[in-house]
Amino acid sequence: MGAETEIRAAGAHSLSAVLIVSKDPARLVAFYRDALGLAMVDEIHDDTDLHWGCELGPIHFAIHPTSNFEQCAEPQPGGINMAFNVPDAQVASDAIEAAGYQVEYAPKDLGWCIMTAVRDPDGNYIELTQFPSGGRGSKAH
């Protein structure tokens, strides 16, 4: 049985969490809170060290120190590319710059969405997408 078949057989059907592991999680939390407006809150549970998280629709988004994931490989700068839906890409771009960060490019209309991007302090590439009528759109990245 191939890996693709095994995944289907396991029944994975949606994403439940995005967990970013960082050598400097407090700095990363400040970016996601101050530049992107995410409501990051302190979390400690079970045997984990302090980390921060929030709910983005049905997905739990969290930033952890490396101590919480010692079984994982060392985090690599720029190893993540994510896209967040925003109601207004220009407002998001302005907020990023007001928080002291630099956008990769001004919002541009791609026909199926308006997009801008920024790199977080760990070098991850973060896209901010504004879809018509607030919908997700029909074109995948």
Image (spheres, rainbow, N blue to C red):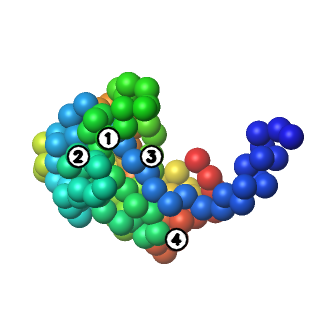
Q: Can see residue 75? A: yes
| Quadrant in the picture for the N terminus | top right
Relative to 76, is 33 on the left or the right? left
Marked residue nearer the N-terminal end (1 or 3): 1
Q: Where does residue 66 sit, x and y in percent of width and height?
A: 30, 34
- Taking the view exactly as shown, the residue that stands out farthest to the front is 47
User: Considering depth in this image, is 95 or 78 the residue closer to the camera?
Assistant: 78
Q: Secondary structure at mark 2?
A: loop
Reading the image, the residue beneath label 1 is: 68
Q: Secondary structure at mark 3?
A: strand
User: Which dot, 1 or 3, sits closer to the camera?
Assistant: 1
Whole-angstrom CA distance, mark 1 to mark 3, is 22 Å
Reading the image, the residue beneath label 4 is: 135
| In contact (CB < 8 Å): disc 1 and disc 2 | yes
Bin the neighbour count of mark 2 within 10 Å (Cα to Cα): few under 14, some 14-19, many 20 and up.
some
Whole-angstrom CA distance, mark 4 to mark 2, is 37 Å
